[in-house]
Image: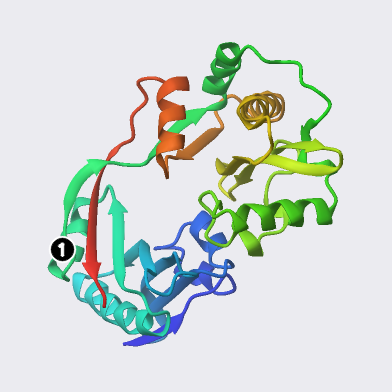
Amino acid sequence: MEFIEITSDNAEDFSAYIDEDMADDLDRVFFRGIGALEGGSPVGAIVYELKDSENEDDTKSRIHVLGGESDEIKGRLIEEYKKGLAEDEVLESFYETGDEILAGILEKNGFSSSQVEGPEIEVTIEDIKKLISVLKITRFPEHIQSISGLSLLQYRTFIKNCLFKGRHGICEDLSYLSKNWFEPDVSSCAVIDEKVEGMLLLKKTPSGKLIPQLYVDLGPDSKKDLLFLLAHTCVKTVEMYPADTKVIIRRHNDSVRNLTNKLIAGRKGDMVFFGTRNEG
């Protein structure tokens, strides 16, 4: 069996295991892919993402994808994955999946396993319409606008300020992402005296899902402007996307969880299997 690096250039060869959204992420700096070949033909793949990689004492890895034509192949991929972690000084691996069989394979390879409510919740543009009525904001002050009007310098300066304060949303690689990686017409910003004070950034995946990536305001009126940013992006998405467009919200911290509990009351994440393994 042969193992090769999977990149966005050859990800299509492994489309039986890697969907188009994950293939697109393989261009990103902290994503890694390993493919298994037998007789030159793809027979399995694993994709993972480095987390907290700027902190050499706490670097983790999240397994996003593990697929193969047999359990043996998946086991061999996990062995190759283990070898790859040493170079990046990963101390812990983790996974979350709704696939019980996959969770079982990972458990056999040294991972813990438990069932928890997943951090992601899914809504549609139709749900966003209802949220607009809850927010009761449809008119916006001049300093609330789409990021399409920002200069590159304005964008980069705000991102630098966010990272200085330890704020990167769900993007480990925020410093590497261009303004146009996000949806420029529906992503919102607060600009006062030419200085960007806040942003709500959305990414549209190749499959058409919208995923909020960063929601931060560092200005003196942050509490008020955060609501304006949210309402502005909601209005723009309703204007620009079909009602059945999926919006995936990853509740990556308590602030986001508290906000969704308040604004999308009763919406729960799917139950998933979650587990970790010490790699130190």
Any part of residue 37 in sight: no
Q: Quadrant of the N terminus?
A: bottom left
Which residue occupies the foreground of this view, 1 or 275?
275
Residue 251 spot, x, y in % from top left = 42, 40
Is 101 rendered above or below residue 202? Answer: below
Residue 253 spot, x, y in % from top left = 42, 43
Q: What's the residue at 85%, 42% (across, down)?
A: 149
Residue 49 spot, x, y in % from top left = 44, 65
Check the image and tell me how it is coloured: rainbow
Q: Quadrant of the C terminus?
A: bottom left
Is 252 rendered above or below residue 111? Answer: above
Q: What's the residue at 52%, 60% (across, down)?
A: 172
**Residue sitting farthest toward the front:** 220
Q: What's the residue at 76%, 43% (across, down)?
A: 196
The residue indicated by pointer 1 is 107
Any part of residue 135 in sight: yes
Q: Amino acid at mark 1?
A: Glu
Is 274 left, or right, of 136 in this rendering?
left
Residue 122 placement: quadrant: top left
Residue 111 placement: quadrant: bottom left
Residue 208 spot, x, y in % from top left = 58, 42
Which residue occupies the foreground of this view, 4 or 136?
136
Secondary structure of the residue carrying numbered label 1: helix
Is 261 left, or right, of 238 in this rendering?
left
Is 228 left, or right, of 273 in this rendering?
right
